[in-house]
Image (tube, helix red, strand yellow):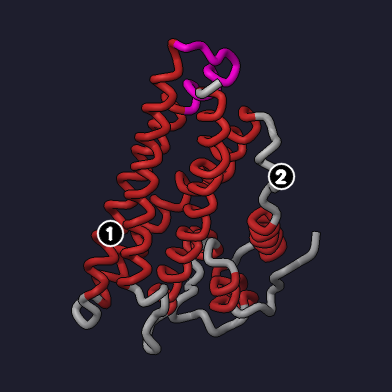
Amino acid sequence: MEQRFTEQSLIGDIVTQFPKAADLFKARRIDFCCGGQRPLKEAIEERGLDGEALLRELNTLYAEAQNKPTGNWNEAPLDELVDHIVRTHHRYLNEELPQLSPYVTKVLRVHGMHHPHLSQVHKRFHELKTELEQHLIKEETGAFPLILQFADNPSPENREAVERAVRELVNEHDAAGDLMKEIRDITNDFTPPEDACGTYRLVYSRLAALEDDLFTHIHLENNILFPRVLAAVKV
């Protein structure tokens, strides 16, 4: 496997290129904020860590993030598409939302006095977090099983239920998308101020990544999965 990062890579640069590395560094008590402008090797030696194991884990996580599964989802079986959405996008949200939350809160606590817009970022993010967590549960426990059941047996009895479920999910997607767009507006397109610290920049970078994944996620459902299901409904 190609080693994207080495012991000579600057800690801050690693987190800038791969924001999820912040979670790994936090777990190992490696300072990526104030101590970001030093080689990873120094932190490894300071903390008495297994540098080879740390780099292997870091580079594996990076490689996995760069090699998300792709496919022609317009033609793939519906169960494969649903499985992809759950394994890729639901998994990402289930991991990222709780991990990002304390960083958003920390930035508000430290910088909110001088950057009052951060209170709105904090509010909107946690509204989004709550809505998405409930939305994922609804999809996985109710809507997706119903959709797959209908795909296997498009009986007239299930048509109304499927149409209603799709309408509800689309409305929830719209609400989540609107919240994400508000966060983009509040953060000036996720552009941190010039004097922003590493954590401040990390939050903005991960919010941008969250938006990118969320919009791809919604696209797969609104523009591919649901139209295919509704086409079956009309048969």
Whole-Å distance between the Cαs marked 2 and 1? 33 Å
100 w.r.t. 132: above or below: below
Quick check: can you spot residue 52? yes
34 w.r.t. 151: above or below: below
**Residue 113, magenta (yes or no):** no
Question: Which residue is located at x 54 percent, y 15 percent?
Answer: 154
35 or 107: which is nearer to us?
A: 107
Give percent across and percent down for residue 42.
Answer: 60, 78
Please state the extent of the stretch shown in magenta in the rendering: 144-156
Give the SS element for disc 1.
helix
157 w.r.t. 167: above or below: above
Question: Which residue is located at x 30 percent, y 45 percent?
Answer: 130
Compared across the picture, whether 102 is left or right of 28 comes to left
207 or 78: which is nearer to us?
A: 78
The label on residue 71 is: 2
Question: Which residue is located at x 51 percent, y 41 percent?
Answer: 221
Quick check: can you spot residue 53? no
2 or 1: mark nearer the eye: 2
Give percent across and percent down for residue 39.
Answer: 62, 80
